[in-house]
Each structure stands twice: as structure tokens, then as C-alpha cells.
Amino acid sequence: MKNAPVQSIIKSLVKSLVKSLVISVTFLTWSMAYTSCETTPQKQDREPVKVAAPAPKPVVKQALRPMPKPKLPEFDYNGFFSRMSIPENEYTETDRHTLTSFPPNPTAGSIHEAALVVGLLRDVLTPFGIESASFKTADTTPPTAVNSSNPNSVVVPSGGAPGNPPSTPQGDLARVIEIRARTMGVDIISALASNPYLKSHGVYNMASDASHIDGNSQIFVQNLATVIKSEVQIWADMFRRLGLDMRPVAVGAAASDPSPSTEQNPALATPPAPLPTGAVPLTPAQNAQAAKHLVTAREFAQREQYESAIVESRKVPPGADNYAESQELTKTWANKVVQTLRQQAASQYSAGRSNPDNEGKKMNLTKSKMFLEQAITKFPEASTLDTVRENLAIIDGEIARLM
């Protein structure tokens, strides 16, 4: 029985050990359960996901695009003029169509004006294929005295010059250069006198031939001839200054003419043109001063101050080396100033024709007369003064009837 206490002690130890083990396991289980409860998130009731309605797209206003400006047709005035100004070049139906596409009312002195003038000259001188029906409605005797299509033209006598019966163009109106030019708004007289593109032998020949076709008024033919003669006179003076022979030579006779030539006998050559009456050759210093006057005149003309340019060019004395050049330039600038005065006269004349009051009409006609008189007295070098005098006579007659 000696082992009873030992066994009792062992049992007590085992029980204590088991009890401790149970306590430990229980504590460990409880700890794990507690930790699990703490870390596990509680389930929450999920709210339904609200799908936002798509936002309406902002209305984008389309920008107003500027309407493209219609492109103005480009015309090859230079090319057309270069071909048509040479009479030997053929004038075709294509050229006729090109001419009809050109806009009217050109600027004075422009290549546009020159192309229209040359095209019209070629057209009236080339009768094939002309559709004259398109000109049946042309107003050959305008009721007003001012060219409605071209303000550069001044007075067109509706009843002829004073004391003369009215002239009615006859024949094919499509070949009457006076009417064709007026229809296109071209003052052909002023153009031939002032437009530098038109100052050539070929153009003047065509203009002279066209003016002699039936239907042009006598006044028109005379004015055109005056302009041509004035220009040709300058060439004649240049020929003389160069000592060239101006005697006419018959066609085909040059090779067979047995008479001695100027090359064989220099004495037969035309002597240089004499100096103007009372003129004496200038000294180098005087020629230098004359050159300065012309330079100043050109500067005024470049600024379109033509009256000042004329004043300076008139200071070049006869006998100066540049006297002939100054005379030609003076005439060119005088034509420009006179053209402006004619436009002002035309405006007053037109206003007088439409003025129902006799006193007002008389006042307008008087102003028109004043502009024309100023052209005659201040610018005697101009080439169109014959036309101005004709217009002045018509205005004087109308003023006399209002007295």
C-alpha cells in the first residue's frame, strides 16, 4: 500500500494538468472566436445603385460661315490688246466673244480702256459673223445730251449743231464705231488723245478707217481726225529733228526708183526742223535748267497734280533740248484736266436737262458753260477742244432759249 500516496499525487497532478489544459483550450477557443467576431465586418443592406441619366448634350450652334465673295472674272487685257493692236493678226470669232465678255465703262488711260478701243475697232472693221440684231435697240439719238453709259462724254447733240438738222446714223449700226463705243461706255476721242497704249501707227490707221464707215456723225469724224493729226504732227517733228526723209514713197517703187537716194546724196535729206520763231539755241546751263523744270513737272504728274505739272512744263523754253518732249507731255496732261472739266460740265448739263425750274435749269447750264470755257482758256494744248467748242455752242443755244 506504499504506492497509494504516489498514485494519489499522480492523479492529482494529472487532474490539475487536464484542468489547466481544458482551461487553456477553452480560453484559446474563446479568444479566437472573439477575434473572429471583431474582424468580420457586419453585412449591410446594399442600396440599389442609382444609374445617373445621361446629361443632355449642349446644343452647339453652327457658326455662320461667311459666304465666299464671288470671284471677279480675270481678263487678259494685255494679251488681247497686244494681238489686236497689230492689224496683221487675224480677228476671229473667239476674239469677238472675248470682246463681248469685257465689262464696260473702263478707267481712262487704263489697259482695260485700250483693249476695248482696239477690240471695237477690229470688230467694226471685220464684218463677218456680226449679229447686228443685238444692236437694233441701240439708242442712236439719245434724248439727253449726256452719254448715260459713259460720264466722260459730254454733250451729244440730240438735234444736231445749231442751224443744222439732226444727224441720224444710217447703215449697219453694229459697224458704227461711234455708237459701239458709246454703248460700251468708252469716250474713244479722249482715249485716242490720252491713253498711252493707243498711241501707235496701227491703232490710228484702224481708227481712221473705222470713222469713215457710214453711220458716224460728221462731228465725231472731225474730232477723231483732229486727234490723229495732232499726234502725227509730233511724229513729223521728230522725223525732221532726226533729219529723216519724209517724202512719200510709192509701194513697189522703192527698188526700181532710179532717183538718187538720201544715202547716195545727203543733200537730198530733209533738213532738221528749224527752231520755233524767235527761239535761239540754249546754253548748256539753260538746258540743264529746262531739264529740271521737266523733272519737277513729271513729279507733279505722278501725284496726279496735272495743273501744276503743266505750269512747270510750260517753263521749258523754245530751243531747249527737251522742248518737243515738254510740249507732248503738256498736251497729255492738258487732255487729262480737260477730261475732268468735261465730266463736271456733263454733270451740270444733265442736272439742267432734268430740272423742271427754268431758273434752276439756267443755273446748271451756266455752270456747265463755265467748265467748258475754263477748258478752252486755260488748257489750249488739249486735243479735244474742238469737241468742247461744239458742246459750248449747244449750251449757249439752250441758255438763249431760256432768256
Image (cartoon, rainbow, N blue to C red):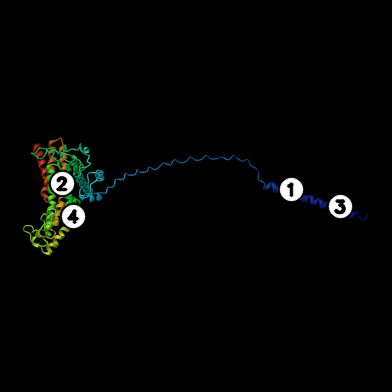
Residue located at (12% from left, 51% from top): 230
Mark 3 neighbour class, 10 Å CA radius: few under 14, some 14 to 19, many 20 or more: few
Q: Are marks 1 and 3 in contact (CB under 8 Å)?
A: no
Above or below, 110 against 266 in this view is above
Q: Could you tell me how far apart the alpha carbons at marks 1 and 2 are, in whole angstroms?
A: 135 Å
Q: Are marks 1 and 4 in contact (CB under 8 Å)?
A: no
- Expressed as whole percent of the image width and height from the top left, the position of residue 208 reads 15, 47
Q: Could you tell me how far apart the alpha carbons at marks 2 and 3 are, in whole angstroms?
A: 160 Å
Mark 1 neighbour class, 10 Å CA radius: few under 14, some 14 to 19, many 20 or more: few
Mark positioned earlier in the residue sequence (2 or 3): 3
- Expressed as whole percent of the image width and height from the top left, the position of residue 90 reads 23, 48
Residue receiving disc 1: 30
Which label was assigned to residue 4? none
Q: Quadrant of the N terminus?
A: bottom right
Mark positioned earlier in the residue sequence (4 or 2): 2
Residue receiving disc 2: 209
Answer with the quarter of the image where residue 290 lies.
Answer: bottom left
SS state under label 2: helix
- Amino acid under label 3? Lys
SS state under label 3: helix
Mark positioned earlier in the residue sequence (1 or 3): 3
Which label was assigned to residue 300? 4
Front-lying residue, 38 or 320:
320
Q: Could you tell me how far apart the alpha carbons at marks 1 and 4 are, in whole angstroms?
A: 120 Å
Mark positioned earlier in the residue sequence (1 or 4): 1
